[in-house]
Amino acid sequence: MTTPNQKTIDRLIDGALEEDLGIGDLTSAATLGNEAQLHLVMETREDIIVAGLHIAGQVFKRLAPDVYIQCLSEDGARVKSGGRLMTLEGLAQPLLSAERTALNIVQILSGIATETGRFVDAIAGSGAILLDTRKTIPGLRVLSKYATSMGGATNHRMRLDDGVLIKDNHIAVCGGLTAAIQRAKSQVPTLTKVQVECDNLDQVKEALKAGAESLLLDNMSPDTMRQAVELVQGQITLEASGGITLDTVRAKAESGVDLISTGKITQSAPSVDIGLDDVET
């Protein structure tokens, strides 16, 4: 599981607060006294899988160091609509100044975790494992992949230096699939797996013969993937990718592939609806 370190979290909070505050929260400064207190509750307005709650807490702490926070849930938990996630007590001005940044983080990350959970549920019992991809919002990759793990996915490579995946453009430049595999295997450390993207069964046969250690079956139908599974006979790992949606993922998982990767859980996941309200209202 990809877990964001404190340096990554601090960098996110620094940038997000700078983006939102500017020179300061004019509204709160103009309407609230310096000693005004506030008791807030954060709750979800839809069924979600929680992610980023501890980061949201750090946002509040950044502007209101003396705030009292009680976490009522935890990352990875499935919470029904109306469920309380956190309560906060402290000075009103800094809490309201931090509100939007904190909510943005927990809404986006919980949205990724929740969408991931839908895909994980859809393939339950098939034997296939759901993977995320590098299709993430720039600057949020570590946090996005952390959120997918909270939803039940397994992390694919974080960066380009995490593994070898030969795709169509690499094959074109090398002059062929076999040439690309042979060149990669001669250049990378012995224990580094060479994975190859295949668009059809002829490429599957060629990649297997050339010594590929994993195949990514790109945009293949479930029937074609079943044929690929029969060709490979469990010799190497097969990953399905491309055209993976909630409507198609079950059929592709049941083809017999080992892994399924999709950018839908990070690139297209909608934020969830989480509110922060005064407990007196």
Image: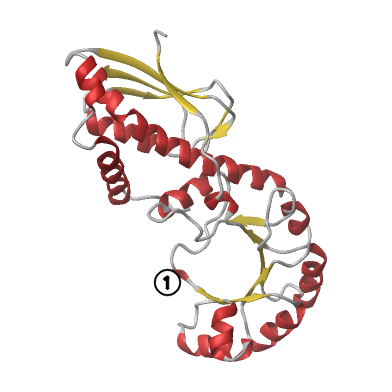
- Check disc 1 and report its element: helix, strand or loop: helix
Instruction: State whether residue 240 is above or below residue 121.
Output: below
- The color scheme shown is secondary structure
Image quadrant in which you'd find residue 197: bottom right
Where residue 62 sits in the image (x, y, percent)? 24, 34
Residue 103 image position (x, y, % from top left): 40, 32
- In the picture, measured across the screen, residue 191 lies left or right of residue 252, that is left
| Residue at the spot 46% in from the left edge and 50% down from the top edge | 144
Residue matched to label 1: 161
What residue is drawn where x is 26% and y is 31%? 61
Above or below, 62 relative to 264: above
Viewer-proximal residue, 130 or 274? 274
- Left/right of residue 170 with respect to residue 14 in the rendered view: right
Can residue 137 be seen? yes
Residue type at mark 1: give it: Asp
Relative placement, left or right, of 31 versus 124 is left
Q: How many marks?
A: 1
Q: Residue at x 41, y 56 (%)?
A: 138
**Residue 259 position in % (x across, y down):** 65, 61
On the question of residue 75 being in view, the answer is: no
Residue at image position (47%, 28%) is 73
Location of residue 280 in the rendering, given as x and y in whole percent from the top left corner: 39, 8
Q: Is residue 214 left or right of residue 113?
A: right
Q: Residue furthest top?
A: 280
